[in-house]
Image: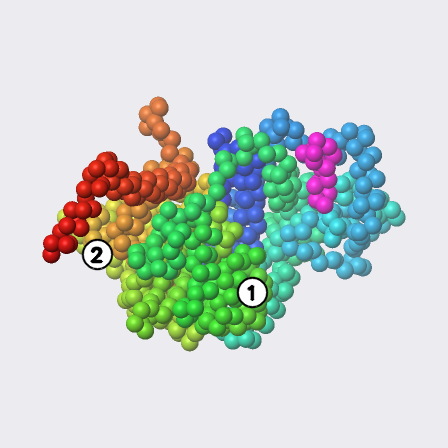
């Protein structure tokens, strides 16, 4: 199709936008280094998940083609590998350039050859005393088995002289006492990496052999595990699969420098990796260490301006959060507002509230140390009915969630795992409390992001708190279906996948199409992380052809190409990549006041979300909050610093300022300033009210104090009146 792009290639374009932040002049130097590390980490996960899937498809269904691009899995792999190789020089240049600029602040990543003679002597002694006793070299040839190379671990590989064939030495770099950054001076800012030292002295591990060549290597293994189930045995099965994942087949071999072709071919043969899956990198194979550099220099010019989540201006300190939500809907915005002072406060209050009857929640990703888990356990220990649907298949969080499920059960929480073959990705909470007159009150929370204190400080997300009974009824039905392993077919107000979301979204798009066809203004807007649901993309193209204005903010992969004549010329697509990870999902239909429909939820416009997962989106009906979301979306559309435009040729570019002197607008910084301002305005308003109350209480005494005679006359007058009657 002319307006569709391959999913994998679109995602690589997203990661390129991340890499651009590693060279963005407005980003401080240490933050630029972090973006290089994020790019590399993203690429690791991409190979583990997406390339792993494609590799399996190339074997199991070699003739099956991608519906967007028409490419087979093998062709997609070739295209992916080509794109990754083209990006590698940019990654290397970004890292080297930033490290060079950081030298003015005393930072220096030293190679062994760059080290002074004194440092080289120290490093040899360091290797012999602190590294060599804890590692061992393994000789590999046709007579010896090839060792198992752990996923993403760095190894030193050396070619050893052999009378016949090829002989290889493999040394695992890391160990239990391993310190990857070895300080050489300047408070640790002058450093060398442990793997570089191991590689330099690798010959000392094989004294009986002559070392012909050496290089660092790193294997990336597939992480594509598939599991289904519901009961207690499902958790046991997941534990087994998480262990098995570490031993899945390699999908990429990275090598740190030029290496003997014979030795490299030998390693590839033993790992069963094709030469096309070998990638050379002339910067560290793992950049995760750069985050440690952040703590070595606190100079403000090297870091982003310090920002801390604000206390939500919509919440009062004097009333319980439940009571405040009962009075009016509340919208929270992270990371600009604090999760600790809002959502976690709500849970903690309800856990200790004797009138709270039950708490039900879906959990997908949690912090390693979770106050949310603590509050749920407290509630259960106090006799409340606590139901937790925890998703054990949350990729790369499986082990963490398995342990939390055990912890919750020990505290008396009812733990369920959701439908057999569908992940539950929804962000849903339902609290039931005894109300006046023996009735029950409800507060429902629907969010766009995980219940995770750590990510709430770096991901942009929205959270709606409402006492709407129709929404509470829908939420109760969602939890009932999760317990039963069934799916919601219809709902009052919520959109609930897999059956009651995409049809409703399409119907609302159809309404805008009909408006446009009748000569009225049709409008569709969405903010999502990814867009690749072919049915939704076809409907958006249909809307564009009917004259509907479509505005999309898509952070990551976007398989819909805008501006294609005859198909998508009325569609615009923006991507915002900046300091915080854009994560909120917003759906808007129409422009006219009350007729406009606005939703927030957990689902992206991907088939895996709309028809293959349990997701929940909620309508925003309070006009105050609707206005706030409209303003939020408008601010995203104004961004001309971190936003990129997707063009009809599939390329992205920054937004050019139209006139010299035009104001730069960074939406993320704007939202933080707004959170600071709202809280400050609230304080001023409260102080003004306090002063006014003080003045009001002083007025009567001031009147009495005007004249002693007046005061004295007033009393007899009242007395005489009473006496007379």
Foreground residue among 604 and 290? 290
Residue occupying the point 40% across, 38% down = 673
Residue occupying the point 74% across, 53% down = 176
Foreground residue among 317 and 525? 317
* Residue 183, magenta (yes or no): yes
Element type where label 1 sits in the image: helix
Q: Which residue is mark 2?
A: 511
Q: How packed is label 1: few (under 14 Cα within 10 Å), some, or many (20 or more)?
A: some
Q: Position of residue 343 (x, y in %)?
A: 43, 56
The answer to whether mark 1 and mark 2 are in CB contact below 8 A is no
Q: Position of residue 371 (x, y in %)?
A: 52, 58
Q: Position of residue 217 (x, y in %)?
A: 68, 47
Foreground residue among 569 and 283? 283
* Residue 623, magenta (yes or no): no
State the quadrant of the C terminus: bottom left
Q: Which residue is mark 1?
A: 404
Q: Which residues are magenta?
A: 179-194
**How many tags in the picture?**
2
Q: Position of residue 317 (x, y in %)?
A: 40, 51
Q: Is residue 487 left or right of residue 143?
A: left
Q: How packed is label 2: few (under 14 Cα within 10 Å), some, or many (20 or more)?
A: some
């Amino acid at each position: 199709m002319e307006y569709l792009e391959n999913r994998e290639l679109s995602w690589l374009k997203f990661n390129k936008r991340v890499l651009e932040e590693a060279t963005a002049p407005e980003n401080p130097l240490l933050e630029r280094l972090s973006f290089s590390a994020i790019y590399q980490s993203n690429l690791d996960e991409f190979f583990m998940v997406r390339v792993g899937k494609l590799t399996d498809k190339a074997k199991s269904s070699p003739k099956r083609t991608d519906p967007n691009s028409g490419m087979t899995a093998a062709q997609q792999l070739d295209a992916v590998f080509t794109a990754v190789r083209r990006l590698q020089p940019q990654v290397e240049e970004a890292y080297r350039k930033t490290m060079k600029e950081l030298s003015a602040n005393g930072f220096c990543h030293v190679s062994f050859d760059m080290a002074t003679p004194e440092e080289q002597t120290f490093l040899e002694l360091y290797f012999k005393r602190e590294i060599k006793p804890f590692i061992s070299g393994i000789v590999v040839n046709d007579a010896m088995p090839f060792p198992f190379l752990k996923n993403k671990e760095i190894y030193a590989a050396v070619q050893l002289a052999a009378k016949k064939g090829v002989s290889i030495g493999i040394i695992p770099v890391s160990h239990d006492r391993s310190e990857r950054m070895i300080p050489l001076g300047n408070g640790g800012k002058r450093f060398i990496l442990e793997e570089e030292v191991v590689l330099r002295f690798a010959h000392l591990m094989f004294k009986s052999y002559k070392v012909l060549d050496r290089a660092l290597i790193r294997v990336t293994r597939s992480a594509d595990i598939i599991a289904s189930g519901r009961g207690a045995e499902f958790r046991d099965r997941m534990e087994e699969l998480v262990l098995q994942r570490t031993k899945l087949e390699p999908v990429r071999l990275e090598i740190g420098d030029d290496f003997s072709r014979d030795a490299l071919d030998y390693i590839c043969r033993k790992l069963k990796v094709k030469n096309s899956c070998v990638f050379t990198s002339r910067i560290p194979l793992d950049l995760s260490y750069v985050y440690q550099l952040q703590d070595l220099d606190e100079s403000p010019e090297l870091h982003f301006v310090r920002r801390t989540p604000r206390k939500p201006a919509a919440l009062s300190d004097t009333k319980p959060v439940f009571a405040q939500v009962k009075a009016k809907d509340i919208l929270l915005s992270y990371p600009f507002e604090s999760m600790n002072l809002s959502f976690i406060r709500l849970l903690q209050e309800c856990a200790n509230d004797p009138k709270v009857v039950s708490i039900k929640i879906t959990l997908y990703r949690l912090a390693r140390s979770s106050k949310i888990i603590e509050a749920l356990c407290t509630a259960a220990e106090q006799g409340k009915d606590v139901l937790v649907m925890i998703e054990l298949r949350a990729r790369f969080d499986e082990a963490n969630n398995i342990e939390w499920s055990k912890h919750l059960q020990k505290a008396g929480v009812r733990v369920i795992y959701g439908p057999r073959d569908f992940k539950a990705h929804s962000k849903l909470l339902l609290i039931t409390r005894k109300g006046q007159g023996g009735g029950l009150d409800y507060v429902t929370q629907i969010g766009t992001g995980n219940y995770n204190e750590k990510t709430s400080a770096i991901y942009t997300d929205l959270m709606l708190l409402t006492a709407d009974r129709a929404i509470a009824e829908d939420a109760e039905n969602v939890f009932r279906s999760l317990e039963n392993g069934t799916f919601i077919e219809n709902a009052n107000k919520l959109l609930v996948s897999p059956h009651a979301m995409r049809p409703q979204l399409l119907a609302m798009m159809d309404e805008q199409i009909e408006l446009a066809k009748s000569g009225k203004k049709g409008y569709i807007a969405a903010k999502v992380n990814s867009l690749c649901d072919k049915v939704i993309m076809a409907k958006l193209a249909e809307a564009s052809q009917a004259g509907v204005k479509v505005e999309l903010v898509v952070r990551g992969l976007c398989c819909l190409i805008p501006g294609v004549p005859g198909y998508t010329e009325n569609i615009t697509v923006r991507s915002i990549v900046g300091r915080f990870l854009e994560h909120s999902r917003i759906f808007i239909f129409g422009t006219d006041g009350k007729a406009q429909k606005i939703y927030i939820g957990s689902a992206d416009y991907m088939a895996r979300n709309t028809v293959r997962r349990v997701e929940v989106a909620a309508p925003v009906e309070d006009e105050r909050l609707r206005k706030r979301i409209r303003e939020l979306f408008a601010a995203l559309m104004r961004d001309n610093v971190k936003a990129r435009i997707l063009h009809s040729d599939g390329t992205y570019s920054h937004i050019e300022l139209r006139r010299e002197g035009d104001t730069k607008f960074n939406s993320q910084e704007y939202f933080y300033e707004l959170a600071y301002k709202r809280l400050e305005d609230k304080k001023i308003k409260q102080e003004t009210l306090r002063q006014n109350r003080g003045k009001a209480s002083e007025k009567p005494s001031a009147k009495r104090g005007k004249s002693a005679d007046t005061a004295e006359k007033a009393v007899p007058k009242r007395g005489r009146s009473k006496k007379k009657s």
